[in-house]
Amino acid sequence: MEKKTDHIPDHVAIIMDGNGRWAKARGLPRTEGHRVGANRVREIVYACLDLGISYLTIYAFSKENWKRPKREVSGIMKLAEIFFRGFFNELKRKGVHFVHLGDKEGLSPSILKIINTMERNNAEEKKLVLSVAFNYSGRSELTGVLRRISELSANGEIEPDHITEQLISNYLYTRELPDPDLLIRTGGESRVSNFLLWQIAYTEIWITDTLWPDFTKETLLQAVDDYKRRERRFGGL
Ligand code: FPP
């Protein structure tokens, strides 16, 4: 008999791509695509709560995104701040627990302030853990782990055979999260773009041409239905 996953994914991660193309197709500035995209995030958080998905992780700003024009970067920063300030309390009331993934260094004092406030006053109930990768890069995350482990080793606190997959996972930004079951990429590109490189070793990937501002609960359901039909073997038979 064919073995199918047959249940919804516990942890969904999303690479929200296509905001720029969505705006361009409408003759709008790219930032307008990001603005509509930020509203979609709220909608998808509610969809995950409805569906009973426990973890949602979104890629909102990569370390590489600093290379974009200044105006676009500051637009994204402003939108993120509006999103965090506008929805944190509302989401907290619904049992959404916030996690920041990424480097705090390099972020502006105003963004840092709201991220620190959210972390300090977080929802204790965890109906949904919303992790926002912001100033995140997978290679930089792994580099940080190697630095930390080499410090421990230099101080004589660990031996080489203490270095296990579990130890590495414990030093990642995602230490509180299980690995993603399903990675969705919108906007049609087939790449992982430095997102959760360690964590997606056995993650099922679903790519849609739908641009992020057009992504709805129905699109999420399509991805979840497709996931349910997958057979996950984790390297076994
Ligand atoms: C990718 O589209 C999207 C981003 C780099 C930014 C995503 C940011 C938001 C949705 C706003 C911030 C929201 C929160 C909740 C923190 P792209 O610009 O690469 O699109 P393109 O491939 O069409 O150019």
Image (spheres, rainbow, N blue to C red):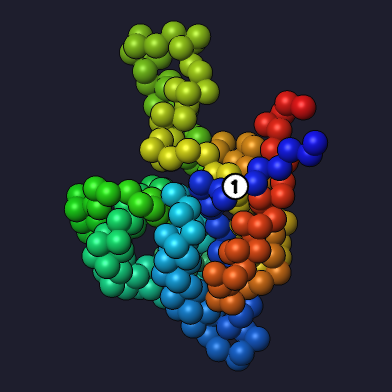
Quick check: can you spot residue 4?
Answer: yes
How many dots with numbers?
Answer: 1
Asked which quadrant contains residue 26, the reply is: bottom right
Residue identifier under label 1: 7
Asked which quadrant contains residue 78, the reply is: bottom left
Depth check: give the residue in front, 110 or 116. 116
SS at mark 1 in the image: loop
Q: x%, y% of residue 129?
A: 38, 50
Q: Is residue 234 above or below residue 108?
A: above
The residue most toward the front is 1
- Relative to 175, is 10 on the left or the right? right
Identity of the amino acid at label 1?
Answer: His
Tell me what residue is drawn at x 38 percent, y 73 percent: 79
Q: x%, y% of residue 58?
A: 48, 57
Q: x%, y% of residue 51?
A: 49, 59
Q: Quadrant of the N terminus?
A: top right
